[in-house]
């Protein structure tokens, strides 16, 4: 699931590669997303209250079983959800077009959460494989999409798991449903959508001392260097003093600019955190899991 597209952040033109093989696909066709300029404004963060989604899982949306180092999850099957989504009336065509054209993301409109990305799978495997103490902890997954790492934290007896994705549609149609399919009642789950720049206030409205998290998880969210400042600020605001952040990402996002080294450089320059490569996955495009803590 490498990035399969080239985009220019402020243009309507997006090049989409054929979807068959993410690493070898080379043929591409250019499509145009008719995205009104006003919908490019970053979305304000809000808390989403899960409605009675369980009984409303449409029959055409399938579920599959997935296992991460012995931890079993039931999750929405991606393709059947995509087919279902293309038949819905979102009232806002952008995200629907992105899904139906298999556009991985369109900056400021759709940030890719309907798809399960490989670093999300890496982080889920890592959490279940390593002896990371999760029981009783408060966990936040930023840029969750399907939320596999957060779901694994839930299964490993986290006290609370809060999920955030840029798109409310992703939270409502995918994340909430995955949580309901796996939830243990004793875990407190909350859901937020919108831009990181306004997340803190959505989590703790009008509270100068926002609630904090022992563990913050995030996968495939550092592709865009323009977002590093706001991401590091939200991490700083929400991490408990002795908390730990795990960032799962590619070393390089070719054509987009970001990557693990660049993000570490940003953190070092900002002076708030220290970072180490905790786990490395060898591949055509190497992937890493960074462990980040506050600078003492
Ligand atoms: C490529 S998707 C990764 C989804 C999932 N973590 C995975 O690995 O399958 C990137 C995610 O980053 C989040 N994201 C990117 N930029 C964001 C921003 N400026 N504010 C909030 N969320 C953002 C979106 O929620 C999106 O789902």
Image: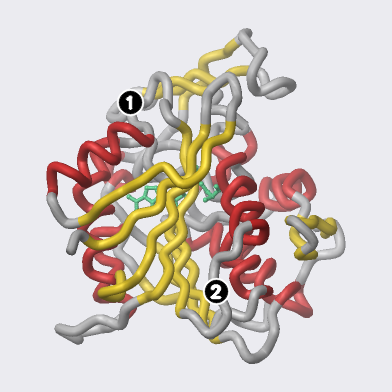
The residue to which callout 2 is attached is 134
Residue 276 position, x and y percent, is 36, 46
Q: Residue 237 is drawn in which quadrant?
A: bottom left
Quadrant in the picture for the C terminus: bottom left
**Residue lying at 73% horizontally and 52% vertically, measured from the top left:** 81
Looking at the image, how many numbered discs can be counted on the residues? 2
* Distance between the alpha carbons at the discs numbered 2 and 1: 33 Å
Residue 59 position, x and y percent, is 86, 63
Residue 242 position, x and y percent, is 31, 73
Q: Residue 128 is drawn in which quadrant?
A: bottom right
**Residue lying at 44% horizontally and 20% vertically, measured from the top left:** 6
- Foreground residue among 216 and 142: 216
Q: Which-is-in-front pick, marks 2 and 1?
A: 2
Residue 201 position, x and y percent, is 25, 75
Near mark 1 (Cα within 10 A), the count class, few <14, some 14-19 or many ≥20, is few
**Residue lying at 49% horizontally and 18% vertically, measured from the top left:** 15
Near mark 2 (Cα within 10 A), the count class, few <14, some 14-19 or many ≥20, is many
In this rendering, the answer to whether 23 lies above or below 112 is above
First-in-chain label (2 vs 1): 2
In this rendering, the answer to whether 289 lies above or below 189 is above
Task: Report helix, strand or loop for mark 1.
Answer: loop
The residue to which callout 1 is attached is 257
Left or right, 229 with respect to 64, comes to: left
Q: Is residue 21 visible?
A: yes
Quadrant in the picture for the N terminus: top right
**Residue lying at 66% horizontally and 13% vertically, measured from the top left:** 24
Q: Residue 149 is drawn in which quadrant?
A: bottom right
In this rendering, the answer to whether 151 lies above or below 12 is below
Mark 2–mark 1 CB contact (< 8 Å):
no
């Amino acid at each position: 699931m490498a990035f399969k597209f080239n985009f220019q952040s402020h243009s309507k033109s997006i090049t989409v590669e054929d979807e068959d093989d993410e690493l070898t696909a080379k043929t591409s066709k250019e499509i145009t997303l008719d995205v009104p300029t006003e919908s490019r404004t970053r979305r304000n963060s809000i808390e989403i209250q899960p409605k009675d989604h369980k009984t409303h899982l449409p029959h055409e949306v399938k579920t599959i079983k997935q296992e991460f180092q012995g931890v079993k999850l039931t999750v929405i099957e991606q393709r059947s959800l995509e087919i279902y989504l293309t038949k819905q009336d979102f009232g806002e065509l952008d995200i629907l077009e992105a899904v139906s054209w298999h556009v991985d993301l369109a900056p400021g409109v759709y940030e890719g959460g309907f798809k399960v990305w490989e670093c999300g799978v890496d982080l889920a495997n890592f959490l279940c494989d390593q002896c990371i103490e999760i029981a009783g902890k408060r966990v936040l997954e930023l840029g969750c999409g399907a939320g596999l790492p957060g779901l694994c934290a839930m299964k490993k007896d986290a006290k609370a798991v809060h999920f955030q994705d840029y798109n409310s549609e992703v939270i409502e149609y995918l994340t909430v449903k995955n949580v309901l399919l796996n939830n243990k009642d004793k875990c407190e789950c909350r859901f937020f959508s919108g831009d990181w720049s306004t997340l803190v206030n959505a989590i703790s409205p009008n509270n100068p001392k926002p609630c904090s998290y022992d563990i913050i998880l995030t996968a495939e969210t550092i592709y865009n260097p323009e977002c590093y400042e706001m991401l590091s600020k939200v991490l700083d605001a929400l991490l408990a003093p002795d908390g730990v952040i795990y960032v799962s990402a590619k070393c390089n996002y070719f054509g987009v600019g970001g990557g693990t080294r660049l993000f570490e450089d940003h953190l070092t320059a900002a002076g708030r955190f220290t970072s180490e490569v905790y786990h490395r996955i060898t591949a055509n495009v190497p992937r890493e899991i960074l462990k980040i803590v506050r600078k003492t």
